[in-house]
Image: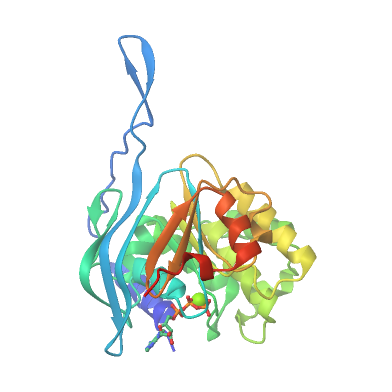
Amino acid sequence: MHLLYPSIIIGIKIVGIKIVGIKIMTINSSKVLRKGKQVEAMPNKLLEINNLQVSAEGKIILNNLNLTVNQGEVHVIMGPNGAGKSTLGYAVMGHPGFKVNQGNIYFEGENITEEKADVRAKKGIFLSFQNPEELSGITLENFLRTTQSAVTGKSIRIMAFKKELGKTMENLNMDKDYATRYLNVGFSGGEKKKSEILQMLLLNPKLAILDETDSGLDVDAVKIVSKGVETFKNNKNSIVVITHNTKILEYLPVDRVHILQNGTIIKSGDVSLIERVNRYGFREFTPAI
Ligand SMILES: Nc1ncnc2c1ncn2[C@@H]1O[C@H](COP(=O)(O)OP(=O)(O)OP(=O)(O)O)[C@@H](O)[C@H]1O
Ligand SMILES: [Mg+2]
């Protein structure tokens, strides 16, 4: 259904020919030294979404949605089926099937609302799909090498890449044979999710949006993936975890939890919100009509 992989691959081809001035954003340090004293500075906004309205096939899916994710933070998005969580991920990634009617998306202070998916990927945004696409004709290894080269703008040294790929696959408990298979073709649900996390680990994005990465994974695989996400996390990158099942958060310090319902964020809070949702469901957050 969605064209994101092909669009990224097409983007890669274009980018390969003309890499047009990749902006290197000067990110303010999160600590500022003033008169010899260390003073906490304002957090750096990595992603800022203002008053977003998004539609697909003429249907408004997200409306008046606001969200700010600072550098180094882990945010969790929960909400009932059909609330618009995946749509939010697609909108941030620039999926061509979703139209922004109103509002803006800023990444590192730059308005990216009109940017194409491959441009956003190069800026450091990554989306792990809820339902990863199968792509016949390109092996997992070739896909990963091509995307890594396009996103970083550097040519990849094959032996070094193979070594990194092998090590990362081993950490995710993935059979190395999968590297030579077509991307996700015939992979089980859980294997596809691992292949998404493998992409994330190799691309090392600044912002990773994980859309139900834990669904379809068996208990051991959730632990492995959760640990993989933990190794990726540092104080410079940010993660938005969309989930119904909070096991994936076991190894991640959660900064903020949001409840998305009917296309908008109706409640935000700290990690205790997860427990409230697990205990009482979403009903108590639904505004009275
Ligand atoms: N391309 C599309 N055309 C029309 N409607 C769509 C399209 N994509 C999504 N929708 C609708 O938008 C709403 C939100 O869908 P979305 O996939 O974002 O929900 P979700 O919160 O991720 O749900 P889930 O928890 O089940 O994954 C749903 O009603 C869905 O049917
Ligand atoms: Mg979804």
Q: From what the image shows, is residue 184 above or below residue 150? A: below
Q: In front: 134, or 81?
A: 81
Residue farthest toward the front in the current orientation of the protein = 288
Seen at 71% across and 71% down, the residue is 217
Residue farthest toward the top in the current orientation of the protein = 36
Seen at 36% across and 66% down, the residue is 92
Q: Is residue 97 left or right of residue 179?
A: left
Where does the N terminus fall, quadrant-wise? bottom left
Residue farthest toward the right in the current orientation of the protein = 220
Name the quadrant containing residue 63.
Answer: bottom left
Q: In front: 2, or 83?
A: 83
Q: From what the image shows, is residue 137 above or below residue 25? A: below
Q: From what the image shows, is residue 44 above or below residue 277? A: above
Name the quadrant containing residue 176.
Answer: bottom right
Q: Is residue 121 left or right of residue 177?
A: left
Q: In front: 121, or 20?
A: 121
Q: Is residue 200 left or right of residue 113?
A: right
Q: Is residue 127 visible?
A: yes
Q: Is residue 164 visible?
A: no
Q: From what the image shows, is residue 25 above or below residue 146? A: above
Where residue 64 appears, as percent x and y from the top left, is 28, 67
Number of marks: 0
Seen at 46% across and 41% down, the residue is 236
Seen at 60% across and 80% down, the residue is 184
Where residue 250 appears, as percent x and y from the top left, is 68, 52
Where residue 75 appears, as percent x and y from the top left, is 49, 53
Where residue 245 appears, as percent x and y from the top left, is 64, 66
Name the quadrant containing residue 131.
Answer: bottom right
